[in-house]
Image (cartoon, rainbow, N blue to C red):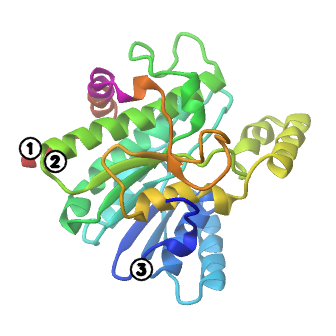
Amino acid sequence: MKGWTASDIPDQTGRTAVVTGANSGLGFVTARELARRGARVVLGCRSERRGAEAAERIRAQAPGARVEVEPLDLADLASVRAFAAEHKGDRLDLLINNAGVMALPHRRTADGFEMQFGVNHLGHFALTGLLLPKLLEAGPGARVITVSSFMHMLGTVDPRDLNMERGYRRWVAYARSKSANLLFTHELAHRLRTGGVRLVAAAAHPGYAATNLMSAAPKMEGHRANERFMAIGNRYFAQSPEQGTLPVLYAATGPDVRQDDFFGPPLQGLWRGSPVRSARAKWTLSDTAGRGLWAASERLTGVRYEALASRG
């Protein structure tokens, strides 16, 4: 995959992709490049207005692009279920679990979960499970790609305190949610492999990419100095969203992607460069932790992967 770029994405004509958080940043670029290669892309966005604006930008930048916008709030399981029900009859080849929040002040989802764990992990766990029957029907080539972060290395999942009731630390909460993304991918890949299913579960991280994710929390709190600091980092140290999206696009379309792969920039740069298989914390490869998080996620969301269980 040395020197792999978006121009290397194979033809996606006839395929359908769902990209969460597609109205800006990595999600926007991911949706645009898949649409540019012929895929029909559904933009799952919390704001329908921003989603519609993103769809127009994609059509302007990629003439002929087939993009649709559907409301999807990963902080509300009712919204996740409504989105899945809306696409019950659709073909689905790619699910890109991209949307996320980072280092927010303490907040709770509509269902009472700590916001970062609820959005980054539980919302996507529920969405994947609800859309799984369509992914299984798509046959060979179907993939579930979940976007994690190199910052997952700063915190493992604590099964005794998934919602950080014992004391909230925003960066620890973020790291744990990103470790949860990788544990989810690890356990899903194991279940797919055991069931003899060709659907591939893999993950990716963008390194340090210049998106609005970094400034969301300072803006929410009105911390102008922190917001300016994040803007300086984006300008002088981060790579572009186009470059940061390459590991996600490779995981979604690359020719040699295997179960439980994790792609990102090269280790020596960590946050910059073309996609390679990335280093990951050893706890994200724990079968015991993966099973435990899966059981807890089923209990908390009420979503069970019955289509996969019936095949196993």
Q: Are marks 2 and 3 in contact (CB under 8 Å)?
A: no
Total labels: the figure holds 3
Alpha-carbon neighbours of circle 1 within 10 Å: few (<14), some, or many (≥20)?
few
Residue tagged 2: 308
Toward the bottom, the furthest residue is 64
Which percent across, then down, holds residue 126? 34, 44
Image point 29% across, 72% down: which residue? 90
Which percent across, then down, holds residue 16? 37, 72
Q: Quadrant of residue 193?
A: top left
Q: Nearer the viewer, residue 92 or 223?
A: 92
Image mark for residue 11: 3
Image mark for residue 289: none
Does residue 304 belong to the magenta stretch? no
Q: Is residue 287 above or below residue 270?
A: above
Q: Secondary structure at mark 3?
A: loop
Q: Are marks 1 and 3 in contact (CB under 8 Å)?
A: no
Image point 60% across, 48% down: which residue? 265
Q: Nearer the viewer, residue 152 or 65?
A: 152
Q: Secondary structure at mark 1?
A: loop
Give the CA separation, mark 2 to mark 1. 6 Å
Mark nearer the N terminus (1 vs 3): 3
Give the CA separation, mark 1 to mark 3. 32 Å
Quadrant of the drawing holding the C terminus = top left
Toward the front, the furthest residue is 2
Residue bounds of the magenta highlight: 285-293
Residue tagged 1: 312
Q: Are marks 2 and 1 in contact (CB under 8 Å)?
A: yes
